[in-house]
């Protein structure tokens, strides 16, 4: 029963983290697009290659 | 992760900055001196000598040619990185608390202190890169800050727009041409904003505050995206490129330690997961509060400057760079 509880809570943690990462990545994408629209710059113009 | 201890300052550090390549680390201090170090081995490359007061702030251009510094002697100085020579001096009625290069290194912005009947002011100067010893004494733009004074500033990706952090905890965007406040968040923090560092593409930034928290804010609307709440006043916050972390530093000052905290110090650099807002580790070492943190532009090492007068450079182990402590989730920088 304890092990099942643990699995349940770790599954919740994993789901929460997945959601947080998805939200973060969606926000990063939207703000970058907004910046490129604002400045007319393409990502490649912005200097160095940015590793993601 | 064995640290390199940089010993060359006799008093507390006020700001440290890597150059764009990350091979050089610039440091300024209350001992009136600016130093430059090789980041890979901690060897001191040179000194920029001339200020007659605490050097509060320093910034270097993307080509590592020009250095700008601001001091309690009311001077803003432009230096040649390579020769250590002072190229130009601007004089103001009050201390220079923060400087930053911007707009492809053709401009600098500075904050001067509110004191002795003078208001806190923001000035933007054009930089004559062709003849660096010939600069305009007069700022291109200047305006006073109404209300809570500005403590930190930086250029943004939008031309003529700067970002400021304030004593009240406010964060603002200003149009430098008119001095108009375009956007603000009065409640970004509830106490002094102590540091402000932008991410590589300048679309978001991190602030640290005496309110014991650091925050990531959206550059467009200044809304908080992430909050990292600690148990100590923070003096600095930095974003670790290519890794999902932020680095926070601070600590109770000596006077408060004896009255408010049983546990002496808490002078550790704290690593927080940028997205999950969870603390993932701490690095000890300093004997006093951490005043300033900088991360190598490639994310391979970081440096912290302390009230104790030391700079500690930590090169990350391979294991740190490889580690995926939260699984395979792809996190954008």
Image (tube, rainbow, N blue to C red):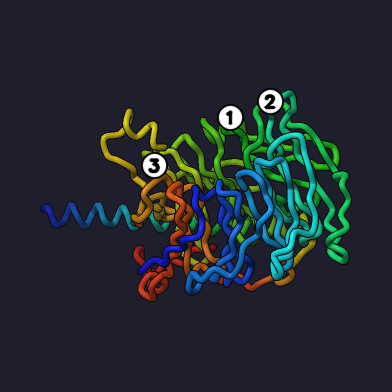
Mark 1: give few (<14), some (14-19) or many (20+) Cα within 10 Å: many
Judge whether B173 appears above or below B69 on screen: above
Q: Is B9 in front, or is B146?
A: B9
State the SS at label 2. loop
Asked if one can make out residue A52 in the rendered structure from this viewpoint, the answer is: no
Residue sitting at 77 percent across and 64 percent down?
A41
Mark 3, residue position: B230
State the SS at label 3. loop
Q: Position of residue B286 (x, y in %)?
A: 38, 52
Chain of residue at mark 1 = B
Mark 2, residue position: B147
Residue sitting at 39 percent across and 76 percent down?
B318
Q: Is B57 in front, or is B79?
A: B79
Name the residue furthest left: A1
Mark 1, residue position: B168
Circles 2 and 3, Cβ within 8 Å, touching? The answer is no
On screen, residue B44 versus residue A10, left or right, reads right
């Amino acid at each position: 029963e304890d092990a099942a509880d643990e699995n349940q809570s770790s599954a919740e943690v994993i789901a929460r983290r997945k959601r947080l990462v998805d939200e973060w990545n969606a926000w990063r994408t939207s703000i970058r697009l907004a910046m490129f629209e604002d400045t007319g710059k393409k990502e490649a113009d912005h200097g160095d290659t940015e590793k993601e | 992760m064995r640290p390199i201890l940089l010993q060359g300052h006799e008093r507390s550090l006020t700001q440290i900055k890597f150059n764009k390549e990350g091979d050089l680390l610039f440091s300024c201090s209350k001992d009136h001196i600016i130093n430059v170090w090789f980041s890979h081995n901690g060897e001191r490359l040179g000194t920029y000598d001339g200020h007659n007061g605490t050097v509060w702030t320093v910034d270097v251009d993307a080509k590592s040619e020009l250095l700008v510094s601001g001091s309690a002697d009311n001077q803003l100085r432009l230096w040649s990185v390579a020769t250590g020579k002072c190229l130009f001096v601007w004089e103001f009625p009050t201390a220079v608390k923060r400087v930053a290069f911007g707009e492809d290194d053709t401009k600098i912005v500075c904050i001067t202190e509110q004191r002795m009947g003078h208001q806190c002011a923001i000035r933007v100067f054009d930089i004559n890169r062709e003849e660096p010893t010939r600069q305009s004494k007069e700022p291109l733009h200047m305006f006073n800050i109404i209300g809570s004074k500005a403590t930190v500033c930086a250029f943004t990706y939008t031309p003529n727009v700067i970002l400021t952090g304030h004593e009240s905890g406010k964060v603002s965007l200003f149009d430098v041409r008119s001095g108009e406040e375009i956007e603000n968040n009065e409640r970004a923090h509830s106490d002094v904003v102590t540091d402000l560092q932008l991410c590589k593409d300048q679309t978001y930034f991190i602030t640290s505050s005496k309110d014991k928290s650091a925050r990531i804010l959206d550059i467009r609307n200044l809304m908080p995206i992430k909050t990292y709440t600690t148990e100590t006043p923070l003096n600095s916050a930095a974003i670790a490129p290519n890794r999902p972390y932020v680095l926070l530093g601070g600590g109770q000052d000596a006077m408060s330690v004896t009255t408010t905290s049983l546990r002496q110090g808490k002078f550790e650099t704290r690593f927080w997961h940028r997205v999950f807002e969870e603390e993932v580790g701490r690095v000890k070492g300093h004997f006093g509060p951490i005043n300033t943190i900088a991360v190598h532009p490639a994310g391979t090492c970081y440096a912290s400057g302390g009230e104790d007068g030391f700079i500690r450079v930590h090169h990350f182990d391979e294991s740190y760079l490889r580690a995926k402590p939260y699984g395979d989730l792809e996190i954008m920088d």
